[in-house]
Image (spheres, grey):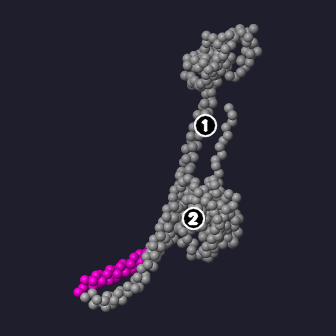
């Protein structure tokens, strides 16, 4: 029997000793007085690596009294210990009743490399998270820039849409000022007549003044004037509200059920001046449920598709808007009778910065961003086009956004 085997507790055979020696895990068998009964080759090599010239006893010295007490009470203690040389050891101390006495054995793994990899992975994960946040911020800025660029292209039309009602409201206010002056003058004449010595004698004078001021016409025109002015102010308010909603930064906007028809009408209100002089608009609205989405982003997609449809029409043409819902999806189709898209161009229309429009008229980002918005909503944009016969873009969205899948954990 070898010297190592003699040091083992009774009933331990050389076969067991051989098994301990060939394992790649450091194992130390400990007696009742915490003496080393046996340490395999891996344990001896680990001790040498932790501190040159030391033996397994040095490894045991790293265990605290608390660790021994916990192992004695519950049968097991585990933890990580870092040596002065930087070696990270994962230690498991087991205590059992054996051969009529209390015996312990320790398994030790050098996890320095594993911990180093974990730290590296954590560092890379942190870098990826920071990069992801920067990309999200850049994407939001790009989205907002393209949104404002679209509004910039429509600025003259939007200004006209605002100036037109403001113009006639301003004109109406001038007329109202004259009307009020006439009415106040007549009221003063009535007041003077009431306090005259003979009020009845003033009747002819008042009647003549009423005819001269054309009070009957004023009374008939006033309600129409006020109604027209009110409609003009409401028109301006609606345009400003639509612009405010459209230019809203939607980074933190939550998905919520919205009326797509309302968003579509709001967007048409913004772009209409750019379209109305050459486009005949057809609306074939179906019945749509409320659709879970970020409305400001979907409005941007619709605006881009409407602007593109208008640009595709050279002189006169039609834009046909059709909506519907089926199989848990809602869709909006925007078709035009414009120039159409060539097959080689059709393959690239969603590429960032790709555009066939002249400089200053297109950024090449509109459709790329629209595609990205649709994808982020778990939707899609379908396109059909024929050169010379027009194009149709169909935005398809799920009525309810799919719930994120929870990962199923395995049993331990």
Dot 2 corresponds to which residue? 262
User: Is label 2 or label 1 in front?
Assistant: 2
Mark found first going from the N terminus, 2 or 1: 1
Q: Is residue 306 above or below residue 10?
A: below
Q: Is residue 57 above or below residue 404?
A: above
Dot 1 corresponds to which residue? 121
Pinpoint residue 5: horizontal percent, then vertical percent. 72, 10
Closer to the camera in the image, 262 or 279: 262
SS state under label 1: helix
Q: Residue furthest left?
A: 197
Residue 206 highlighted magenta (yes or no) = no
Q: How many marks?
A: 2
Pinpoint residue 277: horizontal percent, then vertical percent. 56, 76
Closer to the camera in the image, 326 or 30: 326
Q: Is residue 255 left or right of residue 213?
A: right
Observer able to see residue 76: yes
Residue 195 highlighted magenta (yes or no) = yes
Residue in the image at 43% along x and 76% along y: 226
Main structural element of the magenta stretch: helix, strand or loop? helix
Number of the label disc, if any, that sits on residue 163: none
Residue in the image at 34% along x and 81% along y: 183
Residue span colored magenta: 169-197
Residue in the image at 64% along x and 47% along y: 404
Give the quadrant of the C terminus.
top right
Residue in the image at 60% along x and 30% along y: 115
Q: CA distance from mark 2 to mark 1?
A: 48 Å
């Amino acid at each position: 029997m070898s010297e190592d085997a003699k040091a083992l507790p009774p009933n331990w055979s050389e076969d067991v000793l051989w098994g301990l020696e060939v394992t790649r895990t450091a194992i130390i068998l400990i007696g009742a007085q915490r003496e080393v009964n046996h340490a395999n080759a891996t344990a001896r090599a680990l001790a040498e690596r932790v501190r040159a010239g030391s033996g397994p006893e040095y490894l045991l010295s790293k265990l605290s009294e608390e660790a021994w007490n916990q192992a004695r009470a519950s049968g097991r203690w585990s933890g990580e210990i870092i040596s002065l040389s930087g070696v990270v050891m994962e230690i498991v101390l087991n205590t059992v009743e054996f051969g009529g006495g209390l015996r312990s054995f320790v398994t030790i793994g050098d996890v320095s490399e594993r911990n180093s990899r974990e730290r590296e992975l954590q560092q890379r994960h942190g870098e990826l998270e920071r990069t992801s946040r920067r990309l999200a911020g850049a994407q939001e800025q790009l989205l907002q820039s393209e949104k404002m660029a679209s509004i910039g292209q429509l600025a003259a039309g939007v200004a006209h849409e605002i100036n037109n009602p403001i113009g006639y409201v301003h004109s109406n206010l001038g007329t109202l000022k004259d009307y009020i002056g006439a009415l106040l003058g007549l009221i003063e004449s009535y007041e003077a007549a009431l306090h005259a010595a003979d009020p009845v004698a003033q009747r002819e004078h008042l009647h003549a003044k009423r005819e001269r001021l054309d009070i009957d016409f004023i009374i008939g025109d006033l309600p129409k004037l006020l109604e027209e002015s009110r409609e003009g102010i409401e028109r301006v308010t609606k345009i400003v509200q639509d612009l405010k909603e459209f230019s809203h930064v939607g980074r933190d906007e939550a998905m919520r059920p919205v009326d797509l028809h309302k968003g579509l009408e709001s967007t048409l209100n913004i772009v209409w001046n750019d379209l109305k002089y050459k486009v005949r608009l057809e609306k074939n609205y179906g019945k749509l449920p409320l659709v879970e989405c970020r409305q400001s982003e979907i409005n941007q997609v619709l605006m881009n598709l409407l602007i593109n449809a208008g640009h595709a029409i050279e002189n006169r043409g039609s834009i046909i808007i059709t909506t519907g819902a089926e199989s848990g999806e809602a869709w909006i189709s925007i078709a035009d009778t414009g120039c159409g898209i060539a097959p080689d161009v059709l393959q690239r229309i969603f590429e960032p910065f790709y555009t066939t429009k002249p400089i200053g008229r297109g950024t090449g980002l509109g459709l790329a961003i629209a595609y990205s918005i649709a994808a982020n909503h778990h939707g899609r944009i379908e396109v059909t086009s024929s050169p010379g016969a027009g194009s149709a873009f169909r935005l398809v969205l799920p009525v309810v956004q799919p719930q994120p899948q929870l990962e199923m954990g395995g049993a331990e």
